[in-house]
Amino acid sequence: CDESIDLNGAFVIPAFIDAHAHPIPGARQATGPAITDLTSLDEILRAVKTFADQNSHDPWIIGGSYEAAIIESGDFDAQWLDSVVSDRPVILRAADHHTIWVNSLALKLAGITEHTPDPSGGTIARRGDGSPKGTLREPSAMALILDITPAHSIESDVAAITHACTAYLDAGVTNVIDSWVEKDMAQAYLSAAQSGDLSIPVNLSFLVTPTDWAEKLAECNVLRAQCAALPNPDLVKANSIKFLADGALSPGTAALIEPYIDDPDSHGLKIWGDDELLDALTLFDMHQYQVHIHAIGDAAVKQALDALEAMIGINPTWDRRPVIVHAQLICDEDLPRFKKLGVIANIQPLWCYMDPMNKELILPRLGKVRNDRQYRLRSLIENGAMIAFGSDWPVTSQIPLLAIGVPVNRRAPGIKDGPAWNIEQAITMRESLTFYTKNAAYQMFREHERGALEVGLRADFIVLEKNLFDVDPSEVSTVAIQALYQNGIKLR
């Protein structure tokens, strides 16, 4: 029978949906040195030393994420880590997750010397004599070290999934996409689904690269079939493919049309060649995988849109819903192409203010005019684009209530007064909530299950202590969740 629950006039909204995140890395990070949110080099080094001393049997020290903006140019030195841990390799991820900082032993074990060339699509920071400094950027360079680290087990990743699910439910999130999945991670999700450790539905987006995309199709097909064969096939959907078109602005690896101010010879990095990107997109789209393209710089966004337009012209029509994630810099002429091509712009709302990384690392590299063209949400809306929100956890927090007020007042969470960054690009609270619920569900092909308070949808909703339309956007980050319902059952 139906049950009625009197919420005494409380403010109720659909549960949040995170349409771009990395839950397993987010949970893994919690097992390393506690360096997130530290604001000085000395604090980071103390935290690393404390962790190393308390975990003397760990063969590697791996953690994150540090704020690269606390050091000019973001080039961290291996010798700084050597001063606190020299007997074991250390790897720390930067907050952008496109950069790692390592100690000298890690460089030695990976065989990285002054003679090691920068790999295609990546960079090794160097001293004046050409020797590696200790900072590596982008997956191809990071892999030189990450590929020799101890492998994660299925059991440890199931534990990470359990941790991530708890963190999400605490934040009012009941559905998420893992936007960078490799084979063993997919097996962990399958195992967690079968054991009951996966307590929220998840979409998987399989990473492919210029060196492995053709051979990955068969693997992706097998994994997709295994997910579909689960007793509850809606628990894990595996219909998305992740492409990295460029790097990030903070390390100077996002692909730009005009060069970087601090390095006039550099336009950043395009990870894919135009023809190969088109070939790969066309292959996976032909097999009805949604494509999910990381593109930050304006050149990468243009390359992605060009490739998607060509792909659409080649392949038969279907409900493809392609995604460009981040889309931080977009040329004016490319704004209307999102609607024209049916491309969803997945944006991270917690980045829509002048944060330290933006102020200290990105602004000097772009200059004010280009820097102020980031995150043009209002322009995208005016050009008819669909926007969905994602956290990009652990790059930033997985807590939506911390983020949804930021694009409304273009200030940091909790900041009511003072300068707002590009306030003309602000959105409304209703839009912000829609992008983190209904539109996120649409991006993930789950609009018939979640994302709205409608008859026939699953009863995933949260009860808040205050009406978000009655409080200043700066106060949203302080609003408490009084209750969480999943499938009509109260969990919190």
Image: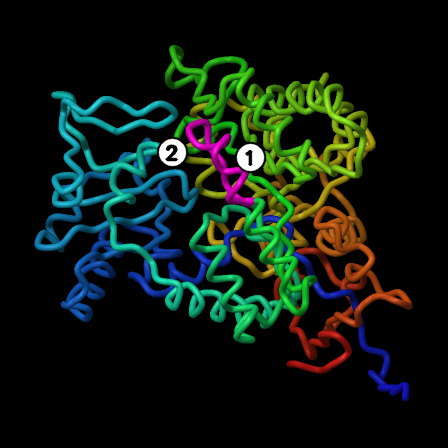
Left or right: 42 with respect to 409? Answer: left
- Residue 397's spot in the image, x, y percent? 52, 56
Q: Is residue 369 visible?
A: no
- Read off the magenta span: 206-220
Q: CA distance from mark 2 to mark 1?
A: 13 Å
Q: Is residue 153 visible?
A: yes
Q: Residue at x 82, y 83 (%)?
A: 7
Q: Which label's residue is closer to the chain start, 2 or 1?
A: 2
In the rendered image, the quadrant that contains the N terminus is bottom right
Left or right: 457 with respect to 145? Answer: right
Q: Residue furthest left?
A: 87
Between 377 and 406, the one lying in front of the other is 377
Left or right: 71 with respect to 59? Answer: right
Q: Residue at x 21, y 51 (%)?
A: 90
Residue at the disc numbered 1: 294
Residue at the disc numbered 2: 138
Q: Is 211 a magenta residue?
A: yes
Q: Tag 2's secondary structure?
A: loop
Q: Amino acid at mark 2?
A: Glu
Q: Residue furthest top?
A: 265
